[in-house]
Image (spheres, rainbow, N blue to C red):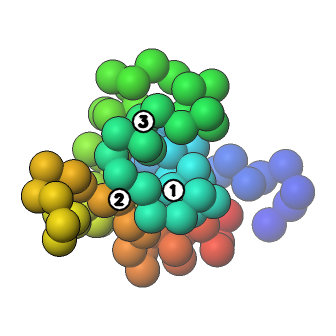
Amino acid sequence: MKPLDWHKKRNASGMPAVAELVLNVIHNEGPLTVMDAMGSSHSKRIASMTTIHGGLKWLREFSYIKIQTDKEDSRTKMCQLTAKGTKYLEVV
């Protein structure tokens, strides 16, 4: 792949730009709660909380992340990368 052709792979996956940025935040900062993923310092620079929530929904729908309920507090949901999400980040 030529150095300037990296965007072609990204467009081929159909992943929205915001979803890709949120995926990178979750990867870099480790498993996060949904609220932490939307309110982290990196996420605040990406987009509004509503837009980030849409990116999280897209990532979950297409199995790039999984949302698990915290064992200690059932109101807390944790975002974790799946194998598909990890593989995507390795290729990019």
Q: Is residue 42 visible?
A: yes
**Which dot marks residue 79?**
2
Extreme-bottom residue of the structure: 83
Instruction: Kindly indicate whether the residue at mark 2 contacts the one at mark 1 (C-beta within 8 angstroms).
Output: yes
| Residue in the picture at 56% in, 26% down | 44
Residue 7 drawn at (x, y percent): 68, 47
Gap in angstroms between the C-alphas marked 2 and 3: 11 Å
**Image position of 58 (left or right of 88):** left
Q: Residue at x 53, y 64 (%)?
A: 30
In the rendered structure, which amino acid carries the disc numbered 2? Cys
The residue nearer to you, when weighing 16 against 45, is: 45
Q: Position of residue 79 (x, y in %)?
A: 35, 59
Q: Tell me the distance, in whole angstroms, between the alpha carbons under discs 1 and 3.
A: 10 Å
Which amino acid type is shown beneath numbered disc 3? Met
Circle 3 crowding by C-alpha within 10 Å: few under 14, some 14–19, many from 20: many
Q: Residue reaching furthest left? A: 74
Q: What percent of the width, then of the height, locates residue 57?
A: 26, 44
Circle number at residue 38: 3
Please give the residue where the numbered disc 1 appears in the rendered image: 26
Mark found first going from the N terminus, 1 or 2: 1
Q: State the residue lying farthest toward the right.
A: 3
Report x, y in % for residue 32: 43, 56
Q: Quadrant of the C terminus?
A: bottom right
Is residue 11 at all visible to an observer of this figure?
Answer: no
User: Spatial distance from mark 1 to mark 2, Cα to Cα?
Assistant: 7 Å
User: What residue lies at 31% left-to-right and 33% top-to-bottom?
Assistant: 54
